[in-house]
Image (cartoon, helix red, strand yellow):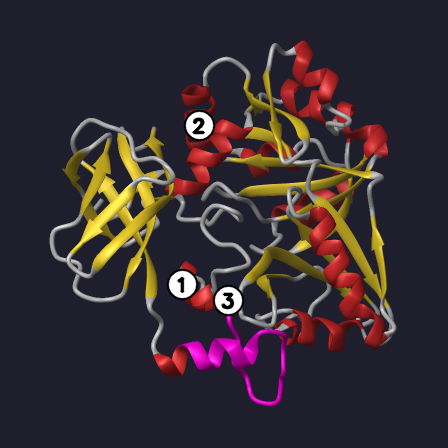
Amino acid sequence: MTEKTVLNATHRALGARMVDFGGWDMPINYGSQIEEHHAVRREAGMFDVSHMTVVDLHGDQARAFLRHLLANNVDKLKVQGKALYSCMLNENGGVIDDLIVYFFDEAHFRLVVNAATRAKDLAWIEQQAKAFGVEVKERPEFAMIAVQGPSARDKVVGLLHDVDRDRIRKLGKFVAAAAQGPHGMPLFIARTGYTGEDGFEIIVPQEQAVALWEALAAAGVVPAGLGARDTLRLEAGMNLYGQDMDDDVSPWEANLAWTIALDEGRDFIGRKALEAQKAAGVKRQMIGLVLDDKGVLRHGQKVLTAAGDGEILSGSFAPTLNKAVAFARVPVGDLGDVRVDIRGKEVPVRVVKYPFVRDGKPCEGI
């Protein structure tokens, strides 16, 4: 059975092209994926991300549990509403999922995890939580809308209750707070996103999601599908779980070393494997590629280097750059002249440091 978000009928009424995404019936675009991409880079677009899984953790040992569960250290979360990005690892150091954790109080934290990994994630979290006496509560009654782009925050703030506007306007990056939306609807607004643009990800009760979507549309926010979300996050240098990393890939190999906190005295799941991998020398690395000639870089294509062969992970045409870009996993070492096998032809590509796009503009050297 394919799952549907509460906004499914709204997408269909807008003429969206729907696809199966991790078992969910989701909009890939509403007409032009490229126009939706540009709308987010230039003004403001919105995405239905209600397929994401919201999980609340309750218990006196909630912080201790998360210190054990996550590779990043939740002790960085000291102020109510502060958020942290982290990987959740298995004993071998492979990535079970990447997620965001929010701090409410010492006995209450919130996780937002990926849709396609929901069952696996919940089973793992519940299994690990038992030893800490932490209650794991999924929150399917919530929907989620991401509003992204240079004018996204202004458009959202304009819809809030007068008393909340200044406070939400001043919200720092990776911080969330409660506010009242149109008709007094309760919102959980986080200054986070998956596009490389500023904006908010808003959790709203399901029964009020359609009204929020319509209010955003009336304020000039353009509906955008998963197609644009994918090209935006790739340009912004953001990993996609299942494509750029998975249970057999460690954060070292996925360019996510910055999410690992090897602080003293914290024995998180997968730590020993990560330390052993680092001591032995990590064998694979994730790099950025740009194709200056015509052609498209796609997942699964072979990458040829002087250090050995690798493969394209995420690859696509990048509308902001008007050329193809990709992430690739290749052996560590001197790569020499790198080529990609595109239908039997070896095509030269440039190795670059990503993100490819920041603040709507190409990064230096791209």
Does 71 appear above or below 2? Answer: below
- In the rendered structure, the answer to whether residue 336 lies left or right of residue 242 reads left
Calculate the distance from the C-alpha at mark 3 to the C-alpha at mark 2. 28 Å
User: Which badge, 2 or 1, is on the more N-terminal residue?
Assistant: 2
Check disc 2 and report the residue beneath it. 37
Dot 2: what SS? helix
Q: The residue under label 3 is which amino acid type? A: Thr
Check disc 3 and report the residue beneath it. 259
Calculate the distance from the C-alpha at mark 2 to the C-alpha at mark 1. 29 Å
At label 1, counting other C-alpha atoms closer than 10 Å, the crowd grade (few under 14, some 14-19, many 20 or more) is: many
Q: Does the magenta portion include 329?
A: no
Check disc 1 and report the residue beneath it. 253
The region drawn magenta spans 259-277
Q: Residue at x 71, y 36 (%)?
A: 50
Q: Does the magenta portion include 264?
A: yes
Image location (x, y in percent) of residue 197: 47, 41
